[in-house]
Image (cartoon, helix red, strand yellow):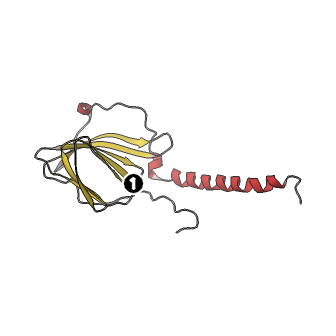
Amino acid sequence: MTSSRPWLRFSLRPAIATLVAAASILASAASSPAFAQDVAASEMFGFDDLPVNEFETTRIRDMLRGLTHSGYPLDMHVTELAAGEAPHPPHQHVHEEMLLIIEGELDVTVAGRTARLGSGSATYIASNDEHGWRNVGDSPARYFVVALGDDEPAPAPEGRP
């Protein structure tokens, strides 16, 4: 059958392929544990009102865990780290992180590079970069950790393993 509008036959193919790909992505996202979270509502977090989780070397106040309006997982907490301590050994994970230092001084290592960062400093940790930090001051350090995404690996681009 020959169409009187051959442009229609060819222009719909990319649109259909895009719809099929989008449906596939949404279906896999719906089965992700992160998808079960709620979209985060606007909120204010008074530091003194947050429950404290105490561990051997840290005190952690969870603030936010949810999804952005577009479904992107977001987690935020503030940590108080004892002088001379590290919160955990260097590690890596799929999700990205931002470290925002409120007070104190940390030696932060990301992907083999170390910098001493103090109050008002920040670092961005890309997916799968090994990272860790230690409080090098004489008093507790406080900092925000903002985790972006989850640990479900992103699908490989089409045609790649």
Relative to 72, 110 lies left or right = left
The residue furthest bottom is 161
Q: Quadrant of residue 143?
A: top left
Relative to 124, 12 lies left or right = right
Circle 1 Cα neighbour tier, 10 Å, few/some/many (<14 / 14–19 / ≥20):
many
Residue 64 image point, x, y percent: 36, 40
Which residue is rendered at x = 89% and y = 53% of the image?
4
- Asked which secondary structure carries label 1, the reply is loop
Which quarter of the rendered picture does the N terminus lie within? bottom right
Seen in the picture, residue 141 relative to 32 is either above or below; the reply is above
Instruction: Pick the residue in front: 140 or 106.
Output: 106
Instruction: Pick the residue in front: 132 or 69.
Output: 132
Relative to 88, 7 lies left or right = right
Q: Which residue is mark 1?
A: 95
Which residue is rendered at x = 74% and y = 53% of the image?
12
Residue 95 image point, x, y percent: 39, 54
Q: How many marks?
A: 1
Q: Amino acid at mark 1?
A: His
Residue 149 image point, x, y percent: 42, 50
Which residue is rendered at x = 51% and y = 53% of the image?
31
Residue 43 image point, x, y percent: 38, 31
Which residue is rendered at x = 56% and y = 51% of the image?
26
